[in-house]
Amino acid sequence: MSKILVVYDSLTGNTARAAELIAEGAKSVKGVKVELRKVDAVSVKEVSEANAVILGCPTHGFTASEKMKALLNKPEIREALKGKTGAIFASCRLTPRALKWLEKTLESLNFKLIGKLGVRGSPKGEKENMFKNLGKQVAEQIKSERA
Ligand SMILES: Cc1cc2nc3c(=O)[nH]c(=O)nc-3n(C[C@H](O)[C@H](O)[C@H](O)COP(=O)(O)O)c2cc1C
């Protein structure tokens, strides 16, 4: 069984909703187990054991939220993320600049980025499907890697 870990930060629920949609999409792929974790509740072990990690947060002050930055600045988490497969997502009011910080940070860890997705506020309409698809894409990718 392949495991996907969705790690998110959310102050007012918008990014949390995106995370749920991603998890839903990933779960639609058979043979994939999905765990949703808040950024301050994730363990190094969970990150290490996951076949893929999908990370998302709100945009705060033109960058990623402090809690997400704090997580990705922990040496043991960085070590656990090295060379992993996954995706990133972010919510914003205007521009999802958090994606830039996430992408740059993960790039330095040799992270294999399958996709990235931003949203203004909470995902609605077609955006809901786009978030589900992002989860599905990551799930299909890790399944094919293990086949
Ligand atoms: C302290 C703070 C700073 C923010 N800074 C930005 C910003 O620089 N750019 C932007 O587009 N939105 C900004 N926003 C808006 C949030 O990114 C947006 O409301 C997002 O949907 C919140 O996600 P959440 O519900 O998961 O917390 C900020 C919100 C807060 C509370």
Image: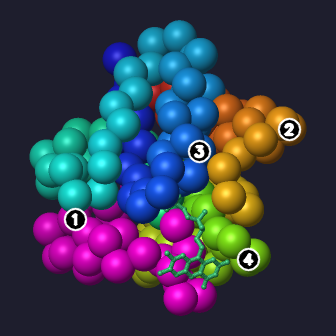
- The local crowd at label 3, few if under 14, some if 14 to 19, many if 20 or more residues have their Cα within 10 Å, is many
Q: Is mark 4 within 8 Å of ligand 1?
A: yes
> Which element is circle 3 on?
helix
27 or 118: nearer the viewer: 118
The earlier-in-sequence mark between 4 and 2 is 4
In the image, the segment drawn in magenta is 58-85
* Residue 8 in the image, given as x and y percentages of width and height: 41, 53
Quadrant position of residue 108:
bottom left
| Picture quarter with ligand 1 | bottom right
Q: What residue type is disc 4 on?
A: Thr
Amino acid type, callout 3: Ala
Residue topped by disc 3? 18
13 with respect to 44 (left or right): right
Q: Which residue is mark 1?
A: 77
Q: Residues within 10 Å of mark 1 (few under 14, many from 20)?
A: some
- Where, quadrant-wise, is the N terminus in this rendering? top left
Magenta-span inclusion, residue 69: yes
Vertical order, 14 against 94 (above or below): above
SS under mark 1: helix
Mark 4, residues whose alpha carbon is within 10 Å: few (<14), some, or many (≥20)? some
